[in-house]
């Protein structure tokens, strides 16, 4: 099983993950703001901007991240922001709390000007993540893995935690990694989604423009 320092590392990542969440008053806007394609796009832009800020804070609290070369820190965040946000929004769908966010988030994403050809794989991914029933430790760890190793082969010792929580499912960690491959493909779809929004003159916030290299 996990060594003492691995447990400490996982606890540090879990604590950072639980500490850095979208503020409730921002998430609650999902329930109250108007419903139109334009309003949905604006609200999702606000959610994404908040989510990037939360992701940066979470990442800075991952032990060792701040000792990386600054260029690498930026490159890791830029390379993984979309995947980390798919993961985070997917966890909203599978957590079903707070009440109501799941339905309205799904509805607003479906009616925000994203073409059906991208909606289908996006919501297939949301369903497949929900089916994994990840606990907060696994969600935090998977997000940290997504951010820290966007291209390098995944280190093996993360698998120890999964056997701990899913002893009856020896291939559980492989299933998790399979989701990361699916997540990678959503990255490509997302690039297309961004350019189709830009064609129809949708504006993003400075932070999103910087992290997604648009405008
Ligand atoms: C559309 C899309 C799908 C997946 C990824 C991206 C980047 C986009 C995407 N692509 O572009 C955009 C904007 C710019 C239009 C988006 C919208 O991204 C997001 C990113 C995160 C969330 C988000 C995150 C955490 C939440 C926590 C809670 C809660 O704890 O209750 N509730 C609601 C939450 C909502 C929503 C939309």
Image (spheres, rainbow, N blue to C red):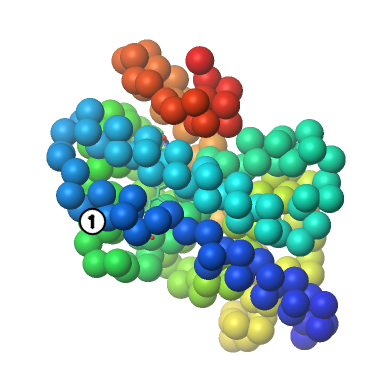
Does 110 sit left or right of 194 as displayed? Answer: left
- Picture coordinates of residue 164 (x, y %)? 66, 84
* Camera sees residue 196: no
Residue 185, image quadrant: top right
Residue located 68% across and 70% down the image: 12
29 to 12, vertically: above or below:
above
Q: How many marks?
A: 1
User: Mark 1 sits on what residue?
Assistant: 103
Q: Residues within 10 Å of mark 1 (few under 14, many from 20)?
A: some
- Picture coordinates of residue 38 (x, y %)? 22, 28
Is the residue indicated by label 1 positioned so its CB lies within 8 Å of ligand 1? no
Residue located 52% across and 72% down the image: 136
Return the residue nearer the eye: 40 or 167. Answer: 40
Residue located 53% across and 67% down the image: 18
Does 153 sit left or right of 12 as displayed? Answer: right
Ligand 1: image quarter: top left
* Camera sees residue 198: yes
Residue located 58% across and 23% down the image: 213
Does 37 sit left or right of 150 as displayed? Answer: left
50 to 87, vertically: above or below:
above
23 to 191, vertically: above or below:
below
- Label 1 secondary element: helix
Residue 1, image quadrant: bottom right
- Picture coordinates of residue 27 (x, y %)? 33, 53
């Amino acid at each position: 099983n996990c060594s003492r320092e691995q447990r400490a590392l996982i606890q540090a990542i879990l604590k950072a993950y639980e500490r850095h969440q979208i503020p409730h008053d921002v998430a609650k806007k999902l329930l109250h703001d108007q419903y139109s394609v334009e309003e949905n796009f604006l609200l999702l832009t606000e959610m994404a901007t908040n989510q990037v800020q939360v992701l940066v804070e979470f990442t800075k609290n991952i032990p060792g991240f701040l000792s990386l070369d600054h260029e690498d820190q930026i490159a890791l965040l830029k390379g993984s922001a979309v995947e980390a946000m798919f993961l985070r929004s997917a966890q909203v769908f599978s957590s079903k709390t707070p009440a109501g966010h799941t339905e309205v988030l799904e509805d607003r994403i479906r009616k925000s000007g994203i073409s059906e050809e991208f909606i289908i794989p996006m919501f297939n991914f949301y369903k497949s993540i929900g089916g994994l029933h990840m606990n907060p430790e696994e969600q935090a760890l998977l997000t940290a893995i997504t951010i820290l190793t966007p291209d390098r082969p995944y280190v093996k010792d993360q698998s120890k935690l999964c056997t701990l929580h899913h002893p009856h499912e020896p291939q559980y960690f492989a299933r998790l990694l399979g989701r990361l491959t699916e997540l990678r493909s959503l990255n490509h779809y997302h690039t297309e989604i961004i350019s189709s929004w830009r064609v129809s003159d949708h504006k993003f916030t400075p932070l999103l423009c910087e992290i997604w290299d648009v405008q």
